[in-house]
Image (cartoon, coloured by chain):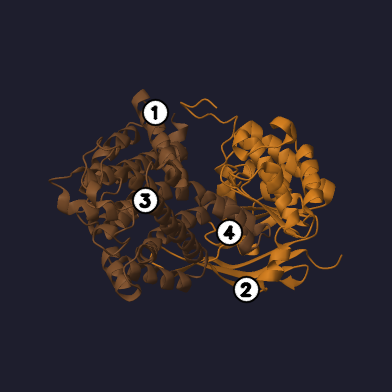
Chain colours: A brown, B orange
Amino acid sequence: MSAPELSPGVPSGPAAGVGAVPAAAGPAAVPTARRGRRSLAARVVEVGAAVVVGLVVLVTLVGPWLAPADPYRVDVTAGLQAPGTGGHLFGTDAEGRDVLSRVLTGGRETVLSTLLVIAVAALVGTAIGLAAASGPRWVDEVLMRICDVFLSVPSLVLALGVAAVLGPSLSSAVIALAVTWWPGYARLVRSVVRDTLQLEYVAAARVLGVSRARLVRRHLLPSIGDTLLVQTTVDVAAVILVISGLSFIGVGAQVPSAEWGAMVADGRSYVVTAWWIVVVPGLAIAVTAVAAQLLGDALRTRLDPTLRNRR
Amino acid sequence: MSGPLLEIAGLTVDLPGADGELRRVVHGLDLTLAAGERVALVGESGSGKSVTAAAVLQLMTEARLGGSIRLDGRELLGMRPRDLRRVRGAEVGMVFQDPLTALDPVVRVVDQVAEVLVVHGEGRRAARLRAREVLDRLGVLGRLPRGDGYPHQLSGGMRQRVGIAMAIVAGPRLLIADEPTTALDVRVQEQVLTLLDDLTRERGTAVLLITHDLGIVAGFAERVAVMRSGRLVETAGVDQLFAAPQADYTAQLLAAVPRIDADLPGTTS
Protein backbone atom coordinates (compact mmCIF):
# COMPACT_ATOMS: atom_id res chain seq x y z
CA MET A 1 0.00 0.00 0.00
CA SER A 2 2.49 2.60 1.06
CA ALA A 3 5.22 1.03 -0.97
CA PRO A 4 4.05 1.99 -4.45
CA GLU A 5 3.04 5.43 -3.27
CA LEU A 6 6.42 6.15 -1.83
CA SER A 7 8.79 4.33 -4.12
CA PRO A 8 8.84 7.16 -6.68
CA GLY A 9 10.50 9.16 -3.94
CA VAL A 10 13.37 6.72 -3.76
CA PRO A 11 16.45 8.28 -5.25
CA SER A 12 18.32 6.44 -7.91
CA GLY A 13 21.18 5.70 -5.49
CA PRO A 14 20.85 2.06 -4.47
CA ALA A 15 19.91 1.22 -8.01
CA ALA A 16 20.50 -2.45 -7.47
CA GLY A 17 17.90 -2.49 -4.72
CA VAL A 18 15.27 -0.46 -6.53
CA GLY A 19 15.57 -2.45 -9.71
CA ALA A 20 15.64 -5.77 -7.97
CA VAL A 21 12.44 -5.44 -6.00
CA PRO A 22 9.81 -5.42 -8.74
CA ALA A 23 11.79 -7.90 -10.79
CA ALA A 24 12.16 -10.36 -7.94
CA ALA A 25 8.63 -9.77 -6.70
CA GLY A 26 7.53 -11.40 -9.94
CA PRO A 27 7.96 -15.02 -8.79
CA ALA A 28 5.94 -14.24 -5.66
CA ALA A 29 3.14 -12.78 -7.74
CA VAL A 30 2.84 -16.02 -9.66
CA PRO A 31 1.69 -18.22 -6.76
CA THR A 32 -0.73 -15.45 -5.80
CA ALA A 33 -2.26 -15.53 -9.25
CA ARG A 34 -2.27 -19.31 -9.50
CA ARG A 35 -3.22 -19.78 -5.92
CA GLY A 36 -5.00 -23.05 -6.46
CA ARG A 37 -1.91 -25.23 -6.51
CA ARG A 38 1.08 -24.20 -4.54
CA SER A 39 4.06 -25.37 -6.48
CA LEU A 40 7.26 -26.71 -5.00
CA ALA A 41 9.10 -23.69 -6.40
CA ALA A 42 6.79 -21.34 -4.50
CA ARG A 43 7.50 -23.15 -1.27
CA VAL A 44 11.24 -23.08 -1.88
CA VAL A 45 10.96 -19.32 -2.39
CA GLU A 46 8.98 -19.01 0.84
CA VAL A 47 11.47 -20.96 2.90
CA GLY A 48 14.41 -19.22 1.24
CA ALA A 49 12.95 -15.78 1.98
CA ALA A 50 12.34 -16.75 5.59
CA VAL A 51 15.90 -18.03 5.95
CA VAL A 52 17.39 -14.85 4.45
CA VAL A 53 15.26 -12.64 6.69
CA GLY A 54 16.35 -14.77 9.65
CA LEU A 55 20.00 -14.30 8.66
CA VAL A 56 19.57 -10.54 8.37
CA VAL A 57 17.99 -10.45 11.82
CA LEU A 58 20.93 -12.51 13.11
CA VAL A 59 23.41 -10.06 11.57
CA THR A 60 21.49 -7.23 13.21
CA LEU A 61 21.83 -8.91 16.57
CA VAL A 62 25.40 -10.24 16.50
CA GLY A 63 26.92 -8.63 13.38
CA PRO A 64 29.42 -6.41 15.23
CA TRP A 65 30.90 -9.48 16.92
CA LEU A 66 31.16 -11.36 13.63
CA ALA A 67 33.10 -8.55 12.01
CA PRO A 68 36.69 -9.65 11.37
CA ALA A 69 38.09 -6.12 11.71
CA ASP A 70 37.24 -2.77 13.30
CA PRO A 71 34.72 -1.25 10.86
CA TYR A 72 35.85 2.30 11.65
CA ARG A 73 39.65 1.84 11.73
CA VAL A 74 41.16 4.02 9.02
CA ASP A 75 44.33 2.74 7.34
CA VAL A 76 45.10 4.94 4.37
CA THR A 77 47.97 2.74 3.29
CA ALA A 78 45.56 -0.16 2.77
CA GLY A 79 42.92 1.78 0.83
CA LEU A 80 40.96 0.43 -2.14
CA GLN A 81 42.22 -3.11 -1.78
CA ALA A 82 40.39 -5.59 -4.02
CA PRO A 83 38.28 -8.35 -2.48
CA GLY A 84 40.33 -11.24 -1.20
CA THR A 85 43.59 -9.31 -0.86
CA GLY A 86 45.27 -8.43 2.40
CA GLY A 87 42.84 -10.49 4.47
CA HIS A 88 39.87 -8.36 3.38
CA LEU A 89 37.23 -10.73 2.00
CA PHE A 90 35.22 -7.92 0.39
CA GLY A 91 38.14 -5.51 0.05
CA THR A 92 38.58 -2.09 1.65
CA ASP A 93 37.20 1.33 0.92
CA ALA A 94 39.15 4.50 0.13
CA GLU A 95 40.13 4.98 3.76
CA GLY A 96 41.19 1.36 4.12
CA ARG A 97 38.22 0.24 6.24
CA ASP A 98 37.20 -3.40 5.87
CA VAL A 99 33.99 -3.51 3.76
CA LEU A 100 32.76 -6.84 5.17
CA SER A 101 33.09 -5.59 8.74
CA ARG A 102 31.27 -2.40 7.85
CA VAL A 103 28.39 -4.25 6.19
CA LEU A 104 28.05 -6.56 9.18
CA THR A 105 28.09 -3.63 11.61
CA GLY A 106 25.98 -1.24 9.54
CA GLY A 107 23.18 -3.75 9.15
CA ARG A 108 22.19 -2.90 12.67
CA GLU A 109 21.65 0.77 11.87
CA THR A 110 19.81 0.09 8.63
CA VAL A 111 17.57 -2.69 9.92
CA LEU A 112 16.86 -1.21 13.34
CA SER A 113 15.95 2.19 11.94
CA THR A 114 13.71 0.46 9.41
CA LEU A 115 11.97 -1.51 12.14
CA LEU A 116 11.65 1.61 14.26
CA VAL A 117 9.98 3.48 11.41
CA ILE A 118 7.55 0.62 10.83
CA ALA A 119 6.81 0.12 14.52
CA VAL A 120 6.01 3.80 15.03
CA ALA A 121 4.01 4.01 11.81
CA ALA A 122 2.06 0.84 12.58
CA LEU A 123 1.26 1.86 16.16
CA VAL A 124 0.23 5.41 15.32
CA GLY A 125 -1.57 4.28 12.17
CA THR A 126 -3.47 1.54 13.99
CA ALA A 127 -4.58 3.87 16.75
CA ILE A 128 -5.74 6.52 14.29
CA GLY A 129 -7.33 4.00 11.94
CA LEU A 130 -9.25 2.42 14.81
CA ALA A 131 -10.41 5.79 16.06
CA ALA A 132 -11.50 6.83 12.57
CA ALA A 133 -13.39 3.62 11.88
CA SER A 134 -15.14 3.22 15.21
CA GLY A 135 -15.62 6.85 16.22
CA PRO A 136 -18.30 9.29 15.11
CA ARG A 137 -18.35 10.44 11.53
CA TRP A 138 -16.77 13.84 12.19
CA VAL A 139 -13.79 12.19 13.89
CA ASP A 140 -13.39 9.98 10.83
CA GLU A 141 -13.52 13.00 8.52
CA VAL A 142 -10.99 15.00 10.51
CA LEU A 143 -8.52 12.13 10.87
CA MET A 144 -8.74 11.09 7.23
CA ARG A 145 -8.21 14.63 5.97
CA ILE A 146 -5.12 14.84 8.19
CA CYS A 147 -4.00 11.59 6.61
CA ASP A 148 -4.49 13.10 3.17
CA VAL A 149 -2.32 16.07 4.11
CA PHE A 150 0.50 13.81 5.24
CA LEU A 151 0.14 11.55 2.22
CA SER A 152 0.42 14.51 -0.09
CA VAL A 153 3.89 15.42 1.23
CA PRO A 154 6.58 13.26 -0.39
CA SER A 155 8.71 11.61 2.29
CA LEU A 156 11.88 12.78 0.58
CA VAL A 157 10.86 16.42 0.66
CA LEU A 158 9.76 16.12 4.28
CA ALA A 159 13.03 14.39 5.15
CA LEU A 160 14.96 17.28 3.62
CA GLY A 161 12.89 19.66 5.72
CA VAL A 162 13.40 17.67 8.91
CA ALA A 163 17.11 17.40 8.17
CA ALA A 164 17.28 21.14 7.69
CA VAL A 165 15.74 21.68 11.12
CA LEU A 166 17.35 18.87 13.14
CA GLY A 167 20.53 18.53 11.13
CA PRO A 168 21.18 15.59 8.83
CA SER A 169 21.35 12.36 10.81
CA LEU A 170 19.85 8.89 10.86
CA SER A 171 17.34 10.01 13.49
CA SER A 172 16.17 12.82 11.21
CA ALA A 173 15.58 10.27 8.49
CA VAL A 174 13.71 7.98 10.91
CA ILE A 175 11.52 10.82 12.15
CA ALA A 176 10.75 12.01 8.64
CA LEU A 177 9.86 8.52 7.49
CA ALA A 178 7.72 7.65 10.49
CA VAL A 179 5.81 10.89 9.98
CA THR A 180 5.12 10.09 6.34
CA TRP A 181 4.51 6.38 6.75
CA TRP A 182 1.70 6.16 9.32
CA PRO A 183 -1.16 7.36 7.06
CA GLY A 184 -0.84 4.16 5.03
CA TYR A 185 -1.44 2.12 8.15
CA ALA A 186 -4.23 4.39 9.32
CA ARG A 187 -6.08 3.87 6.05
CA LEU A 188 -5.44 0.15 5.99
CA VAL A 189 -6.63 -0.37 9.56
CA ARG A 190 -9.60 1.92 9.03
CA SER A 191 -10.80 -0.04 6.02
CA VAL A 192 -10.33 -3.44 7.69
CA VAL A 193 -12.08 -2.30 10.86
CA ARG A 194 -14.93 -0.74 8.90
CA ASP A 195 -15.47 -4.03 7.13
CA THR A 196 -15.35 -5.91 10.41
CA LEU A 197 -17.83 -3.52 11.99
CA GLN A 198 -20.36 -4.52 9.33
CA LEU A 199 -20.18 -8.14 10.42
CA GLU A 200 -22.99 -9.51 12.46
CA TYR A 201 -20.84 -10.70 15.33
CA VAL A 202 -19.93 -7.14 16.13
CA ALA A 203 -23.62 -6.26 16.23
CA ALA A 204 -24.22 -9.37 18.33
CA ALA A 205 -21.53 -8.36 20.82
CA ARG A 206 -22.91 -4.83 21.01
CA VAL A 207 -26.46 -5.99 21.51
CA LEU A 208 -25.41 -8.26 24.36
CA GLY A 209 -23.98 -5.34 26.29
CA VAL A 210 -20.31 -5.25 25.26
CA SER A 211 -18.87 -1.75 25.66
CA ARG A 212 -17.14 0.12 22.87
CA ALA A 213 -13.68 -0.19 24.40
CA ARG A 214 -14.07 -3.90 24.96
CA LEU A 215 -15.45 -4.35 21.47
CA VAL A 216 -12.32 -2.76 20.01
CA ARG A 217 -9.99 -4.79 22.21
CA ARG A 218 -11.62 -8.19 22.00
CA HIS A 219 -13.33 -8.26 18.63
CA LEU A 220 -11.72 -5.68 16.35
CA LEU A 221 -8.00 -5.75 17.15
CA PRO A 222 -7.59 -9.51 16.60
CA SER A 223 -9.12 -9.19 13.15
CA ILE A 224 -6.48 -6.72 11.95
CA GLY A 225 -3.53 -8.73 13.30
CA ASP A 226 -2.78 -10.75 10.19
CA THR A 227 -3.31 -7.80 7.85
CA LEU A 228 -0.82 -5.80 9.89
CA LEU A 229 1.70 -8.65 9.92
CA VAL A 230 1.63 -8.88 6.15
CA GLN A 231 1.77 -5.13 5.63
CA THR A 232 4.68 -4.59 8.03
CA THR A 233 6.70 -7.37 6.41
CA VAL A 234 6.14 -6.00 2.93
CA ASP A 235 6.89 -2.48 4.18
CA VAL A 236 10.30 -3.55 5.46
CA ALA A 237 11.41 -3.72 1.85
CA ALA A 238 10.09 -0.28 1.01
CA VAL A 239 11.34 1.45 4.15
CA ILE A 240 14.81 -0.09 3.92
CA LEU A 241 15.12 1.33 0.42
CA VAL A 242 14.02 4.80 1.44
CA ILE A 243 16.19 4.84 4.58
CA SER A 244 19.21 3.82 2.53
CA GLY A 245 18.20 6.29 -0.13
CA LEU A 246 18.03 9.13 2.35
CA SER A 247 21.45 8.20 3.69
CA PHE A 248 22.74 8.02 0.14
CA ILE A 249 21.69 11.57 -0.67
CA GLY A 250 23.19 12.71 2.61
CA VAL A 251 20.08 13.41 4.64
CA GLY A 252 20.34 10.27 6.78
CA ALA A 253 23.32 8.54 8.34
CA GLN A 254 26.54 10.51 8.02
CA VAL A 255 29.84 9.53 6.51
CA PRO A 256 31.85 7.51 9.02
CA SER A 257 28.70 5.55 9.78
CA ALA A 258 28.51 2.08 8.27
CA GLU A 259 24.82 2.39 7.46
CA TRP A 260 24.38 0.61 4.12
CA GLY A 261 23.01 3.54 2.19
CA ALA A 262 25.74 5.81 3.53
CA MET A 263 28.35 3.23 2.48
CA VAL A 264 26.99 3.20 -1.05
CA ALA A 265 27.13 6.99 -1.10
CA ASP A 266 30.67 6.94 0.27
CA GLY A 267 31.88 4.63 -2.46
CA ARG A 268 30.11 6.18 -5.42
CA SER A 269 33.13 8.17 -6.62
CA TYR A 270 35.13 4.95 -6.83
CA VAL A 271 32.47 2.89 -8.55
CA VAL A 272 34.62 2.44 -11.67
CA THR A 273 37.91 1.67 -9.93
CA ALA A 274 36.67 -0.08 -6.77
CA TRP A 275 33.21 -1.46 -7.50
CA TRP A 276 33.08 -3.55 -4.31
CA ILE A 277 32.65 -0.51 -2.04
CA VAL A 278 29.27 0.16 -3.68
CA VAL A 279 28.21 -3.33 -4.70
CA VAL A 280 28.60 -5.14 -1.36
CA PRO A 281 26.37 -2.85 0.76
CA GLY A 282 24.12 -2.40 -2.27
CA LEU A 283 23.65 -6.15 -2.47
CA ALA A 284 22.97 -6.28 1.27
CA ILE A 285 20.17 -3.74 0.78
CA ALA A 286 18.78 -5.54 -2.25
CA VAL A 287 18.85 -9.01 -0.73
CA THR A 288 17.22 -7.85 2.50
CA ALA A 289 14.53 -5.93 0.66
CA VAL A 290 13.74 -8.74 -1.75
CA ALA A 291 13.62 -11.36 1.01
CA ALA A 292 11.32 -9.22 3.15
CA GLN A 293 9.08 -8.60 0.16
CA LEU A 294 8.88 -12.31 -0.70
CA LEU A 295 8.21 -13.24 2.91
CA GLY A 296 5.42 -10.69 3.07
CA ASP A 297 3.86 -12.10 -0.08
CA ALA A 298 4.13 -15.62 1.29
CA LEU A 299 2.47 -14.55 4.53
CA ARG A 300 -0.30 -12.85 2.59
CA THR A 301 -1.02 -16.02 0.64
CA ARG A 302 -1.02 -18.11 3.78
CA LEU A 303 -3.05 -15.80 5.99
CA ASP A 304 -5.73 -14.79 3.52
CA PRO A 305 -8.63 -17.04 4.55
CA THR A 306 -10.12 -17.04 1.05
CA LEU A 307 -6.86 -18.36 -0.36
CA ARG A 308 -6.31 -20.75 2.53
CA ASN A 309 -9.65 -22.46 2.06
CA ARG A 310 -8.92 -23.19 -1.56
CA ARG A 311 -5.80 -25.12 -0.77
CA MET B 1 -47.02 -8.26 37.59
CA SER B 2 -48.80 -5.21 36.32
CA GLY B 3 -48.38 -3.74 32.87
CA PRO B 4 -46.79 -5.31 29.83
CA LEU B 5 -43.12 -6.34 29.74
CA LEU B 6 -42.49 -4.64 26.43
CA GLU B 7 -44.59 -1.81 25.13
CA ILE B 8 -43.86 -0.37 21.71
CA ALA B 9 -45.98 2.66 20.90
CA GLY B 10 -45.98 4.73 17.73
CA LEU B 11 -42.54 3.49 16.75
CA THR B 12 -41.08 5.13 13.67
CA VAL B 13 -37.78 4.19 12.10
CA ASP B 14 -35.98 6.27 9.50
CA LEU B 15 -32.98 4.79 7.73
CA PRO B 16 -30.60 6.59 5.40
CA GLY B 17 -30.80 5.27 1.86
CA ALA B 18 -27.98 5.03 -0.65
CA ASP B 19 -28.23 8.77 -1.29
CA GLY B 20 -28.00 9.57 2.41
CA GLU B 21 -31.62 10.77 2.52
CA LEU B 22 -33.65 9.39 5.42
CA ARG B 23 -36.45 7.07 4.41
CA ARG B 24 -39.21 6.00 6.77
CA VAL B 25 -39.35 2.22 6.97
CA VAL B 26 -41.56 1.78 10.04
CA HIS B 27 -44.64 4.00 10.29
CA GLY B 28 -46.02 4.19 13.81
CA LEU B 29 -46.03 0.64 15.10
CA ASP B 30 -47.78 -0.42 18.31
CA LEU B 31 -47.02 -3.77 19.90
CA THR B 32 -47.05 -5.11 23.43
CA LEU B 33 -45.69 -8.27 25.00
CA ALA B 34 -46.72 -9.53 28.42
CA ALA B 35 -44.16 -11.25 30.62
CA GLY B 36 -43.58 -14.78 29.38
CA GLU B 37 -45.65 -14.20 26.26
CA ARG B 38 -44.54 -15.45 22.85
CA VAL B 39 -45.35 -13.24 19.93
CA ALA B 40 -44.43 -13.79 16.31
CA LEU B 41 -43.86 -10.79 14.10
CA VAL B 42 -44.36 -11.92 10.51
CA GLY B 43 -44.25 -10.27 7.13
CA GLU B 44 -42.52 -10.46 3.79
CA SER B 45 -38.98 -9.30 3.14
CA GLY B 46 -38.69 -5.55 3.51
CA SER B 47 -41.81 -5.23 5.62
CA GLY B 48 -39.81 -3.72 8.47
CA LYS B 49 -40.01 -6.60 10.91
CA SER B 50 -36.27 -7.01 11.37
CA VAL B 51 -35.83 -3.26 11.62
CA THR B 52 -38.43 -3.21 14.38
CA ALA B 53 -36.56 -5.94 16.23
CA ALA B 54 -33.27 -4.12 15.86
CA ALA B 55 -34.89 -0.89 17.06
CA VAL B 56 -35.76 -2.34 20.46
CA LEU B 57 -32.08 -2.63 21.39
CA GLN B 58 -31.06 0.28 19.13
CA LEU B 59 -28.79 -1.85 17.08
CA MET B 60 -28.66 0.38 14.02
CA THR B 61 -26.40 3.31 14.77
CA GLU B 62 -27.43 5.22 11.66
CA ALA B 63 -31.19 4.89 12.24
CA ARG B 64 -33.40 7.71 13.53
CA LEU B 65 -35.98 6.31 15.94
CA GLY B 66 -39.22 7.92 17.08
CA GLY B 67 -42.12 7.00 19.32
CA SER B 68 -41.65 4.98 22.45
CA ILE B 69 -40.25 1.60 23.48
CA ARG B 70 -40.81 0.76 27.13
CA LEU B 71 -39.39 -2.20 28.97
CA ASP B 72 -41.13 -2.68 32.31
CA GLY B 73 -42.25 0.91 32.05
CA ARG B 74 -38.73 2.28 31.47
CA GLU B 75 -38.24 4.18 28.24
CA LEU B 76 -35.44 2.66 26.15
CA LEU B 77 -35.35 5.34 23.47
CA GLY B 78 -33.02 8.13 24.47
CA MET B 79 -31.64 6.10 27.36
CA ARG B 80 -28.06 6.87 28.32
CA PRO B 81 -25.64 4.46 26.59
CA ARG B 82 -24.38 3.21 29.92
CA ASP B 83 -27.88 2.27 31.07
CA LEU B 84 -28.78 0.82 27.72
CA ARG B 85 -25.75 -1.45 27.95
CA ARG B 86 -27.11 -2.87 31.20
CA VAL B 87 -30.37 -3.72 29.46
CA ARG B 88 -28.67 -5.31 26.47
CA GLY B 89 -27.97 -8.97 27.08
CA ALA B 90 -29.03 -8.95 30.72
CA GLU B 91 -32.70 -8.01 30.33
CA VAL B 92 -33.19 -8.42 26.61
CA GLY B 93 -31.33 -11.07 24.65
CA MET B 94 -31.12 -11.34 20.90
CA VAL B 95 -30.57 -14.25 18.52
CA PHE B 96 -29.37 -13.43 15.04
CA GLN B 97 -30.27 -14.84 11.69
CA ASP B 98 -26.97 -16.11 10.37
CA PRO B 99 -24.99 -18.29 12.78
CA LEU B 100 -22.04 -18.18 10.38
CA THR B 101 -21.47 -14.48 10.92
CA ALA B 102 -22.95 -13.87 14.36
CA LEU B 103 -20.02 -15.48 16.16
CA ASP B 104 -16.55 -13.99 16.36
CA PRO B 105 -14.33 -16.45 14.49
CA VAL B 106 -11.28 -15.81 16.68
CA VAL B 107 -12.89 -16.15 20.12
CA ARG B 108 -13.43 -19.59 21.65
CA VAL B 109 -17.04 -20.64 22.04
CA VAL B 110 -17.09 -20.82 25.84
CA ASP B 111 -15.38 -17.43 26.14
CA GLN B 112 -17.83 -15.97 23.70
CA VAL B 113 -20.81 -17.06 25.77
CA ALA B 114 -19.07 -16.15 29.03
CA GLU B 115 -18.34 -12.66 27.74
CA VAL B 116 -22.02 -11.77 28.02
CA LEU B 117 -21.84 -12.54 31.75
CA VAL B 118 -18.47 -10.85 32.20
CA VAL B 119 -19.65 -7.56 30.71
CA HIS B 120 -22.53 -7.64 33.15
CA GLY B 121 -20.23 -7.89 36.11
CA GLU B 122 -19.75 -11.60 36.70
CA GLY B 123 -16.29 -13.00 37.49
CA ARG B 124 -14.43 -14.71 34.67
CA ARG B 125 -14.31 -18.11 36.32
CA ALA B 126 -17.96 -18.17 37.35
CA ALA B 127 -18.94 -16.86 33.94
CA ARG B 128 -17.11 -19.66 32.15
CA LEU B 129 -18.73 -22.20 34.44
CA ARG B 130 -22.22 -20.92 33.68
CA ALA B 131 -21.42 -20.67 29.99
CA ARG B 132 -20.37 -24.32 29.97
CA GLU B 133 -23.57 -25.32 31.77
CA VAL B 134 -25.74 -23.58 29.21
CA LEU B 135 -23.74 -24.91 26.27
CA ASP B 136 -23.97 -28.38 27.75
CA ARG B 137 -27.73 -28.02 28.15
CA LEU B 138 -27.91 -27.06 24.47
CA GLY B 139 -25.84 -30.07 23.46
CA VAL B 140 -22.92 -28.06 22.05
CA LEU B 141 -20.13 -29.07 24.39
CA GLY B 142 -20.20 -32.72 23.35
CA ARG B 143 -19.48 -31.67 19.76
CA LEU B 144 -16.24 -29.94 20.61
CA PRO B 145 -12.94 -31.69 21.26
CA ARG B 146 -11.96 -31.17 24.91
CA GLY B 147 -15.11 -29.17 25.51
CA ASP B 148 -14.08 -25.93 23.83
CA GLY B 149 -13.16 -24.69 20.42
CA TYR B 150 -13.68 -22.08 17.75
CA PRO B 151 -16.94 -21.46 15.90
CA HIS B 152 -15.61 -22.87 12.63
CA GLN B 153 -15.35 -26.30 14.26
CA LEU B 154 -19.13 -26.40 14.62
CA SER B 155 -21.93 -27.02 12.14
CA GLY B 156 -24.45 -24.31 11.38
CA GLY B 157 -27.05 -25.72 13.74
CA MET B 158 -24.55 -26.00 16.56
CA ARG B 159 -23.39 -22.44 15.96
CA GLN B 160 -26.95 -21.22 16.18
CA ARG B 161 -27.20 -22.99 19.54
CA VAL B 162 -24.15 -21.03 20.65
CA GLY B 163 -25.98 -17.91 19.51
CA ILE B 164 -28.96 -18.92 21.62
CA ALA B 165 -26.69 -19.63 24.58
CA MET B 166 -25.23 -16.12 24.28
CA ALA B 167 -28.70 -14.63 24.16
CA ILE B 168 -30.09 -16.43 27.20
CA VAL B 169 -27.07 -17.02 29.43
CA ALA B 170 -27.56 -13.80 31.37
CA GLY B 171 -31.18 -14.71 32.05
CA PRO B 172 -33.04 -12.02 30.12
CA ARG B 173 -36.81 -11.75 30.48
CA LEU B 174 -37.26 -10.96 26.83
CA LEU B 175 -35.66 -12.74 23.91
CA ILE B 176 -35.73 -11.26 20.44
CA ALA B 177 -35.10 -13.88 17.80
CA ASP B 178 -34.56 -12.41 14.34
CA GLU B 179 -35.23 -15.23 11.87
CA PRO B 180 -33.27 -17.67 14.02
CA THR B 181 -33.90 -20.64 11.76
CA THR B 182 -33.86 -19.11 8.29
CA ALA B 183 -30.23 -19.97 7.60
CA LEU B 184 -30.59 -23.58 8.75
CA ASP B 185 -31.81 -26.64 6.92
CA VAL B 186 -35.23 -28.00 7.76
CA ARG B 187 -34.32 -30.75 10.21
CA VAL B 188 -31.91 -28.54 12.10
CA GLN B 189 -34.55 -25.78 12.08
CA GLU B 190 -36.84 -28.00 14.02
CA GLN B 191 -34.21 -29.00 16.58
CA VAL B 192 -33.17 -25.40 17.16
CA LEU B 193 -36.74 -24.24 17.43
CA THR B 194 -37.58 -26.99 19.91
CA LEU B 195 -34.60 -26.03 22.05
CA LEU B 196 -35.58 -22.38 21.93
CA ASP B 197 -39.10 -23.39 22.88
CA ASP B 198 -38.04 -25.57 25.83
CA LEU B 199 -35.50 -23.10 27.19
CA THR B 200 -37.79 -20.11 27.12
CA ARG B 201 -40.62 -22.09 28.70
CA GLU B 202 -38.35 -23.34 31.48
CA ARG B 203 -37.27 -19.82 32.27
CA GLY B 204 -40.51 -18.03 31.54
CA THR B 205 -38.80 -15.84 28.98
CA ALA B 206 -40.98 -13.77 26.71
CA VAL B 207 -40.09 -14.19 23.04
CA LEU B 208 -40.48 -11.86 20.09
CA LEU B 209 -39.96 -14.14 17.12
CA ILE B 210 -39.29 -12.41 13.82
CA THR B 211 -39.92 -14.66 10.85
CA HIS B 212 -41.35 -14.87 7.37
CA ASP B 213 -41.98 -18.58 7.82
CA LEU B 214 -45.58 -19.07 8.86
CA GLY B 215 -44.93 -22.78 9.19
CA ILE B 216 -42.91 -22.32 12.38
CA VAL B 217 -45.26 -19.71 13.83
CA ALA B 218 -48.16 -22.03 14.52
CA GLY B 219 -46.33 -24.32 16.89
CA PHE B 220 -44.36 -21.63 18.67
CA ALA B 221 -46.21 -18.39 19.20
CA GLU B 222 -49.34 -17.52 21.13
CA ARG B 223 -50.01 -14.33 19.25
CA VAL B 224 -49.08 -13.18 15.77
CA ALA B 225 -48.53 -9.66 14.50
CA VAL B 226 -48.51 -9.23 10.74
CA MET B 227 -46.48 -6.41 9.19
CA ARG B 228 -46.53 -4.98 5.72
CA SER B 229 -44.62 -1.98 4.37
CA GLY B 230 -43.71 -0.79 7.83
CA ARG B 231 -47.21 -0.97 9.23
CA LEU B 232 -49.00 -3.46 11.43
CA VAL B 233 -51.78 -5.09 9.42
CA GLU B 234 -53.25 -7.41 12.00
CA THR B 235 -52.61 -8.76 15.46
CA ALA B 236 -54.42 -11.88 16.59
CA GLY B 237 -54.16 -15.06 18.60
CA VAL B 238 -52.40 -17.72 16.59
CA ASP B 239 -55.43 -20.02 16.24
CA GLN B 240 -57.71 -17.17 15.27
CA LEU B 241 -55.25 -15.86 12.72
CA PHE B 242 -54.84 -19.16 10.98
CA ALA B 243 -58.59 -19.97 11.11
CA ALA B 244 -60.03 -16.61 10.19
CA PRO B 245 -57.55 -13.94 9.08
CA GLN B 246 -59.12 -10.50 9.34
CA ALA B 247 -56.93 -8.60 6.94
CA ASP B 248 -56.79 -9.41 3.23
CA TYR B 249 -53.03 -9.32 3.34
CA THR B 250 -52.89 -11.96 6.07
CA ALA B 251 -55.10 -14.21 3.99
CA GLN B 252 -52.81 -13.75 1.01
CA LEU B 253 -49.80 -14.50 3.15
CA LEU B 254 -51.39 -17.66 4.47
CA ALA B 255 -52.41 -18.76 0.98
CA ALA B 256 -48.84 -18.26 -0.19
CA VAL B 257 -47.45 -20.85 2.22
CA PRO B 258 -46.45 -23.87 0.18
CA ARG B 259 -48.33 -26.93 1.29
CA ILE B 260 -46.77 -30.33 1.23
CA ASP B 261 -50.03 -31.97 0.09
CA ALA B 262 -50.77 -29.55 -2.70
CA ASP B 263 -50.39 -30.60 -6.31
CA LEU B 264 -47.70 -28.62 -8.00
CA PRO B 265 -47.02 -29.87 -11.50
CA GLY B 266 -43.36 -30.48 -12.18
CA THR B 267 -42.21 -30.29 -8.59
CA THR B 268 -41.37 -32.96 -6.11
CA SER B 269 -41.33 -31.83 -2.55
Circle 4 residue: A216
Residue A185 placement (x, y as % from top left)? 42, 58
Label 3 residue SS: helix
What amino acid is at disc 2? Answer: Gly
Q: Label 3 is found on which chain of the structure?
A: A
Task: Tell whether label 4 touches label 3 (CB within 8 Å).
Answer: no
User: In this view, which residue lies farthest toward the left?
Assistant: A272
**Marks 3 and 1, the one that precedes in the sequence:** 1
What is the CA distance from the residue labelled 4 to the residue labelled 1?
36 Å
Label 4 residue SS: helix
Task: Tell whether label 1 touches label 3 (CB within 8 Å).
Answer: no
Label 1 residue SS: helix
Q: Label 1 is found on which chain of the structure?
A: A
Height in image: B77 above or below A87?
below
The residue positioned 73% from the left and 34% from the top of the image is B147
Circle 3 residue: A106
Q: Quadrant of residue B174?
A: bottom right
Circle 2 residue: B67
What is the CA distance from the residue labelled 3 to the residue labelled 1?
31 Å
Label 2 residue SS: strand
Mark 4, Cα crowd under 10 Å, few <14 / some 14-19 / many 20+, is: some
